[in-house]
Amino acid sequence: MYQTHPSSYMSSADPAVFRNREVVVRTVQGGKTYTPQDYQQLFQDGGLSLAQQLASFYIGFVKFAPPFFPNVDVYAEKGSRLDTIVGAQLQNLTVGQVLNNSPVFFTRDGDSNQEDITNDAIAVWANMPCYRFVLTDNPDVGHFDLPSNPVVLQRLLADLQQTKSVCPSQ
């Protein structure tokens, strides 16, 4: 079922952004590692031919380069400095494999839900002509704690009071 759902791939690390900067799967048998840029090889080695066909249509679906900017002022908040799971060690590449009682996970710095690469990818919007872009880091604040964090809420309320940028039509 997961192989046919676009969301299975849309939530995958975009190889164009992540390249080989994190390991998403490592096998115990053979010790082979797979990074986001190895997704086609991972699916081939795992015998997931349907995933091989579908993944390229959906992985990396969000465009972050001109002319795909939102063309509005952007005030973004992120958490950081928290271990964030990005991958797992598996016995092999058997479909339906269940993790054992002591799973080995790979982590990166992040907000406990999104790793630093994902959270920092929005910074490309700083290149929008004319519009404001502000990305505020909140060290030690988790992803799901951001909306209720009093400091974040105060800042966002202040951002709402900012006069909107008036830019030439795109």
Image (tube, rainbow, N blue to C red):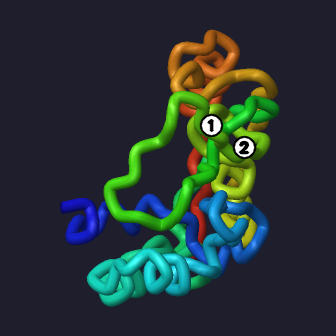
Examine the image and state in which quarter residue 154 appears.
Answer: top right
Q: Position of residue 101 (x, y in %)?
A: 52, 29
What's the residue at 76%, 34% (across, down)?
80
Q: Which amino acid does the dot numbered 2 rest on? A: Thr
Which residue lies at the image location 62% right of the left edge and 52% below the top edge?
89
Residue 69 is situated, as x and y percent measured from the top left of the image, at 55, 71
Residue 138 vs 72, above or below: the answer is: above
Residue 104 visible in the displayed image: yes
Q: State which mark lies toward you, 2 or 1.
A: 2
- Read off the residue under disc 1: 162
* Label 2 crowd (10 A; few <14 / some 14-19 / many >=20): some
Residue at x 41%, y 86% (from the top left corner): 56
Nearest the viewer among 146 and 54 is: 54
- In the image, residue 160 above or below residue 9: above
Give the left or right position of residue 9, taking residue 108 as reference. Answer: left
Tally of numbered discs: 2
Q: CA distance from mark 2 to mark 1?
A: 37 Å
Element carrying mark 1: loop
Choose the circle earlier in sequence order: 2 or 1: 2
Local crowd size for mark 1, using a 10 Å CA cut-off: few (<14), some (14–19), many (≥20): few
The three-letter amino acid code for the residue at tag 1 is: Gln
Find residue 26 and report its horizontal and vertical position in percent. 65, 61
Please determine whether, in this image, residue 47 is positioned above or below residue 127: below
The residue at which mark 2 appears reads as 107
Q: Position of residue 35 (x, y in %)?
A: 67, 71
